[in-house]
Amino acid sequence: MARIDDILAAGAAVSKLDLRRYLASREMATPVDYNAIEGGVVDCAPAFAAAFAENDAVFVPPGTWRIAAPIVLGYGQSLFGVGDASVIQAREDPWDANALPAYPSTFDAIELQDGYCTVRDLKIVGGSSALKLYGLQGPCVRNVLEDLTIWDAVIGITLDGYDDTQKPCYWNSISKILIARPRLHGVLMTVLSTGDTPNANKVHDVRVYSLSAPMTGCGFFLSTARFNNSFIDCEANLHPSAEACFRLGAMTDQTRILNFYAECSGAVPGIRIDNGSTNTSIIGLFSATGGAPIWDTTGHREYMAFAAGYPYTALLKATTITDLSVEGLNYATRFVEGQTTVTPDFSVAPLWLVSSWAGAVQVVLPLPSDCLGRVGIVKKSDSSNNSVTVTLPSGSGPDNGAVVLRAYGDHIMFISNGAAWHLVSRHYDTPISGWANPSGSAFTRGPFNADELENVGFSYDRNVLNNINYRLHDTRAVLRALILDLKTKGILGD
């Protein structure tokens, strides 16, 4: 905006448009009205404080306005400029796009300590936090930050639950912001004392760029934040020294991330999920980093994803599909060895391969009431003579009886209807207790020899029958009785 001395320069024509804009600007307070001096040398913080003591809206004219203390906004107050030409400089050194910053600031540049405030159309240089939102005077709610450029702050934007649960940090809107060269974090959500977690804040079109400046934190770090904080069309393009483009800390819940862009030339994860973080939704992640697109640090999978991640681009939970066509199907699998008792978690994997090489194993199924609709598969994966017994805590099992898997490859598939586990497929030998021996002699089980069948009247593969001898302990006794029965009836010759 033109200065009045330039508009009314002696001997020059007066621009009516420039004069009209200037007069309109004089209808609102500016720091100049309170003795601020533009140029980046004189401390203008007292002038901003005086302006907000008497006005709810303060306009920042084009120029560089240095401050040595925070600009504080109370309830319903607004601070705005004309864009990048209106500069709030929270340090002595001027901004230099070509020099790496030193981060000397020990104070926040702008603090929103109450609700319904607006900060827009400014460039902010420096600050411990360029913008800090926290409920000191009142609930820090419904504040608006938009069309801002932030350079060389330790943290770009901090949302802090602070120390009073009656003054929370909720429902704030943050949009169309560039955060360039932060030292620690671009956006931080946290609780530095005993207040409530930042909840239901909306972050849209916020971009964090390192621009070759080293940083030690994250583009977006939710240390403590819950209940529907959303991040839409945001981006982090970071130095390889960073921790993560987006990090979800241990005290986060119900976070929504949509169409996030992550980029880094180093092994930095796109999205990092810490132990304790739950119920995150990630939709449409583009990750161009040297690290994992989604790094689930514990493998607990306390998140859902769609069109996000690699090699699998979706992780869905409690999903109902009315019509599904599958071209390729993989089962999550768990292998267990060296345990005497196994309690499978079918919410993690349906297929459990159990080795009883070191001794007999008991597989204790979860209660069917906790697994409505779940399908489970248990298979004995070793060739030892030790058994794998599948039971319930009550001692029963699928179809109301314990199942004993004795041979390599024996397995069962079962499903819960909420009341019981039901067998739907099986491959194992069921002991026979009531088979009558047609020869009239005592029915006994003994070693099976394929050579005994040389003259039974049909061709056979010796290796196949020897494999039966090796694998099917109970079936071989049944087969002996069947052959004796066929001989007795004259169907088979001697």
Image: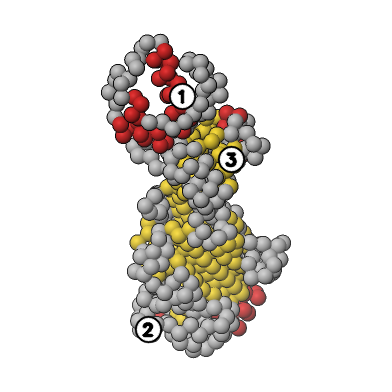
Report crowding for label 1: few under 14, some 14 to 19, many 20 or more residues within 10 A (C-alpha): some
Query: Residue 165 appears at what percent x and percent y?
Result: 70, 62
Q: Residue furthest top?
A: 489
Mark 3: which secondary structure? loop
Hey, which quadrant is residue 34 in on the image? bottom right
The residue positioned 65% from the left and 74% from the top of the image is 54
Mark 2: which secondary structure? loop
Q: Are marks 3 and 1 in contact (CB under 8 Å)?
A: no
Compared to 385, does 191 lie above or below?
Answer: below
- Pointer 1: what residue? 478
Query: Residue 242 appears at what percent x and percent y?
Result: 44, 72
The residue positioned 50% from the left and 85% from the top of the image is 104
Q: Marks 3 and 2, how far apart in space?
A: 63 Å
Q: Marks 3 and 1, how far apart in space?
A: 30 Å
The amino acid type, in three-letter code, at marker 3 is: Leu
Q: Earlier in the sequence, mark 1 or mark 2?
A: 2
Mark linked to residue 365: 3
